[in-house]
Amino acid sequence: MDFAPSERTQTLAEHLTRFMREEVVPAEPLYAAELTGSADHRAWRQPAIMETLKNKARAARLWNLFLPDAELGAGLSNTDYAPLAEIMGHSFIAPEVFNCSAPDTGNMEVLHRYGTAEQRERWLKPLLAGETRSAFGMTEPEVASSDATNMQATARIDGDHVVLNGRKWWTTGAGHPHCRFVIFMGLSDPDAEPHRRHAMVICPLDTPGVKIERMLPVFHHYDEPSGHGELSFTDVRVPIGNVILGPGRGFEIAQGRLGPGRIHHCMRAIGAAERALSLLCKRASSRVAFGKPLAELGGNPDIVANLRMAIDQARLLTLKTAWTLDTQGTKAALSLISQIKVVVPAVAQQAADAAIQIHGGAGLSDDFPLAQLFAYARVLRLADGPDEVHRGVIAKLEAKAQESRESFR
C-alpha cells in the first residue's frame, strides 16, 4: 500500500492550504455576519462573500476537485483527493467554496455516472458550474431509516410520468436559495425483492405538490443557508425521463454514491479534528491556572498525546479505505468504508469535546468553532448510517472472512 500523495496532489495541497489560510478562514466571520439567524428558510440568502470566494477558487483552478473525471473535474483518485478533503475540513464554509460540498458532490457523481445525456445537461452542468445547489431525499420520519428497506415513499410509474408521494426529512441543502432539485428515492415496485424495489428520481423543488414543511435544527442550529428540510411530496408528477438509470435501480445507485462520499465525509472530519486539536494546544499553552500553563496541568498532556495518536490512526485507516476503493473496487472496501464511518466521527467528536473542555466557557460560545465542530462530529455518527449499522456490516463481513480463512489450529 502506498499512501504517499502524488506530485500533483502535493502541488494542489500547497495551493489549497494557501487559499484556505489567506482567503477562506479570514472570511468565516464575514460569512457568519451575513446570515439571518432565522428559522424561516424563505428569509435565507446566500452570503455574498461565498460567491466572491467561489469565483476566486474557480480562477485558481481549485474547483470540482472531488470528481475523478479529468474533463469535468480534477481527475483525481480517491487516494489523491483524500488529503485535499482533509484540508477543506478545517473550515465549515470551505467545501462549498471549492464546489466540493455534500450533498452536491454525491448528486454530481450520481448524475455523472448514471445520468442520461439530457439529465447531465439540465441538472449536472449547472451544479458543476456552482450556479445551483441540490438535495437528496432518502430518510423518512415515520420509519427506522437505519434500515433503508423500510422506506415507504413511492415513485409510481404512470405512463410517461412518475408520481411521487411520501415525506422525507433531514434532506440537507433543501433550504438553500440556490437549491433547484432533490433526488428522491422511493418504491417503484413494492413487490420486487427488497433491493430492487426503489428508484431515484430527479424532482425539481418548484414542482406542484412539493412542500418544505419545516427546517430541522441541529442542537438548536439551522445550518443556514443550506439547512436540513422535512419535505412532503403529494401526487408530484415529473417526466419519466427524470428517473435515474431506471426503476428498481435505486439501491444500486446508492451503493455507488456512498463509497466515495463516506471517504470525503471522513477526511473532512479528520480536518475538523485537526483544527480542534490545534485550537486546544494553542489555548492550553497560552492560558495559566494555578501557576502553570493548562498544557502542564492534570492529565492534559495525555489528552493531547491520545488525540494525536487517534487522529493519525483514523487518517491511515481512511487512506487505506481510499486506496482499496481505487485498486480493488467498492465490494473489497465495504468493511473498511463502515470502519471509517464508525472510527472517524468518534475521533472528531473526542477532539472537539477535549478542546471545549480546555477552553472552558469560551468553548461553548460562538467565539470559537468548537461547539459547531462537536455538533458536526456528533451528526456524522448518524449520517450515512448510524454506528450500530456499520458495526453490524463489519461483523458480518468479518465472520464471512474468518470462515474462508485457514486456521493455525
Image (spheres, grey):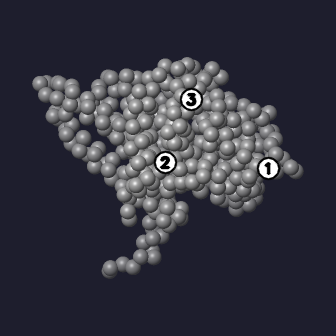
Q: Secondary structure at mark 1?
A: helix
User: Mark 3 or mark 2: which is in front?
Assistant: 3
**Residue at 49% across / 33% down in the picture?**
93
Quarter of the image that includes the N terminus? bottom left
Badge 3 vs badge 2, beta-carbon distance below 8 Å: no
**Residue at 32% across / 23% down in the picture?**
361
Residue 370 placement, left or right of 218? left
Query: In this rendering, is residue 28 above or below 8?
Result: above
How far, Cα to Cα, is label 1 from label 2? 30 Å
The type of residue carrying mark 2 is His
Q: Position of residue 289 (x, y in %)?
A: 17, 24
Q: Earlier in the sequence, mark 1 or mark 2?
A: 1
Q: Secondary structure at mark 2?
A: helix
Q: Earlier in the sequence, mark 3 or mark 2?
A: 3
Residue linked to disc 1? 241
Residue linked to disc 3? 51
Viewer-proximal residue, 11 or 4?
A: 11
